[in-house]
Image (cartoon, rainbow, N blue to C red):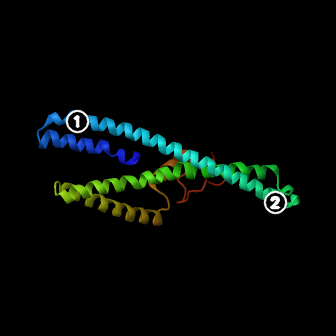
Amino acid sequence: MSAACSLAPCLVVYAVTVVLFIDDAPGRIPAIASWTAADLVVRALTSAASEHLAHTATYRMLRRLRLRIVQTLQSIPLGRVQARSAGELTKTLHDDVEQLEEAFAHGVPDGSAAAAVPLATTATLRRRLAAGTDRVWATAMAVCAAILVLQWIWSTLWLRFVGQGPIERLWRMATWWDAGAGTTAAPAGRGQRH
């Protein structure tokens, strides 16, 4: 819902443009502003709820996973556990498990938002097209689809023949003083910087 509410500014610009230049009814602008304010409140609340739920669920899952690892360590022979260093066990129990937090607490909400925006946009466009009120939206949707297809073709060809994107090449030149030979690995003799 938060991602869908993020479309409101675009819809507000469109609605104000229609009110001012097509319908000539500037008296409707306060109503549009009220709906915009309500949308911003709903977006803030749903975004906060999404973040809270994602983190709460993720930390519960990580706790259960750590308990499961400890139970597994308790059930295997002591010699096999002692054969591993304390650092290796700490890495498994803390660092490896903690990396899952990024995927679940941030990746799932962001992925849902990435899917929600095109779905909400498509639903809005479909409703308008079904009503027959605005054929410009159909043209805009066709142009966007064509741009996405062209970007996909261009990116595929670029990466096949060049090996890295133009921004990546500029970033490498700025950080490593070396454009590289189409790879993303660090130049020989220099360690990775974190």
Q: Nearer the viewer, residue 101 or 35?
A: 35
* Residue 110 in view (yes/no): yes
Residue 53's disc is none
Residue 115 location (% of width, % of height): 41, 56
User: Which image quarter holds the C terminus?
Assistant: top right
Q: Choose top left, top right, bottom left or bottom right for residue 18.
A: top left
**Element type at mark 1:** helix
> Is 138 displayed left or right of 95 in the figure?
left
Residue, disc 2: 75
Q: Amino acid at mark 1?
A: Ala
Q: Nearer the viewer, residue 193 or 32?
A: 32
Mark 2 closeness class: few <14, some 14–19, many ≥20 residues within 10 Å? few
Q: CA distance from mark 1 to mark 2?
A: 66 Å
Residue, disc 1: 31
Residue 54 location (% of width, % of height): 53, 47
Residue appearing at x 42%, y 66% in the figure:
157
> Is 144 displayed left or right of 63 in the figure?
left
1 or 2: tag closer to the N-terminus = 1
Q: Amino acid at mark 2?
A: Ser
> Is 112 displayed left or right of 19 in the figure?
right
* Residue 189 in view (yes/no): no
